[in-house]
Amino acid sequence: MAKLLEPATMHEILTHSDSYQRAVKLLHQDWEVDGLSLFHNRLQGADIKFARLLQSNRLVLGEIDLDNYRAVSELINQHPQWFSTSARHELLRPFEG
């Protein structure tokens, strides 16, 4: 369900901040991990939260439904190198009992 966005969040969206761009890349499954440094440039929990916010407000729908367990599970299994531990936890958090 869409909710009123905070001014700081709106600023990030309107200026296409780094956080916004990271979230959009996730939603379009267009993420790249730096091949030379496996632990750099991984998605973080904050990136997942921002992507969910964009998707729930219908600002960026993307190619993956972050509210669908199967879609999220497939994403994690297909691209495990994209996600930090915090990002994996945040992706799965809504589906925990």
Image: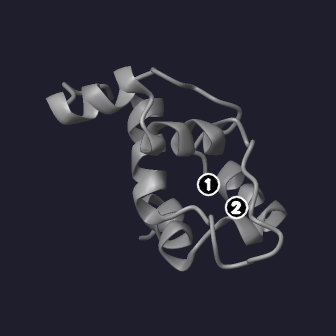
Where is residue 32? Give x, y as percent: 76, 54
**Secondary structure of residue under mark 2:** helix
At label 1, counting other C-alpha atoms closer than 10 Å, the crowd grade (few under 14, some 14-19, many 20 or more) is some
Residue at 75 percent across and 70 percent down: it is 80
90 lies left or right of 82:
left
**Label at residue 94:** none
Residue at 62% of width from left, 64% of height from top?
Answer: 41
- The amino acid sitting under disc 2 is Ser
Q: Are marks 2 and 1 in contact (CB under 8 Å)?
A: yes
Amino acid type, residue under disc 1 in the picture: Tyr
Q: How many marks?
A: 2
Q: Is residue 70 above or below residue 22?
A: below
Q: Nearer the viewer, residue 52 or 34?
A: 34
Q: Quadrant of the N terminus?
A: top left
Name the residue furthest front. Answer: 36
- Can the viewer see residue 6 in this picture? no
Q: CA distance from mark 2 to mark 1?
A: 6 Å
Residue 54 placement (x, y as % from top left)? 43, 32
Where residue 84 sits, quadrant-wise, is bottom right
Res 69 label: 1
Say which residue label 2 marks.
73
Judged from the image, the secondary structure of the residue bearing numbered disc 1 is helix
- How many neighbours does mark 2 have within 10 angstroms: few (below 14), some (14-19), or many (20 or more)? some
Q: Position of residue 77 (x, y in %)?
A: 79, 67
Q: Residue 69 is drawn in which quadrant?
A: bottom right
Instruction: Determine the image quadrant of residue 17.
Output: top left
For the C terminus, which image quadrant? bottom left
94 relative to 50, above or below: below
Asked whether, in this view, residue 52 is left or right of residue 74, the answer is left
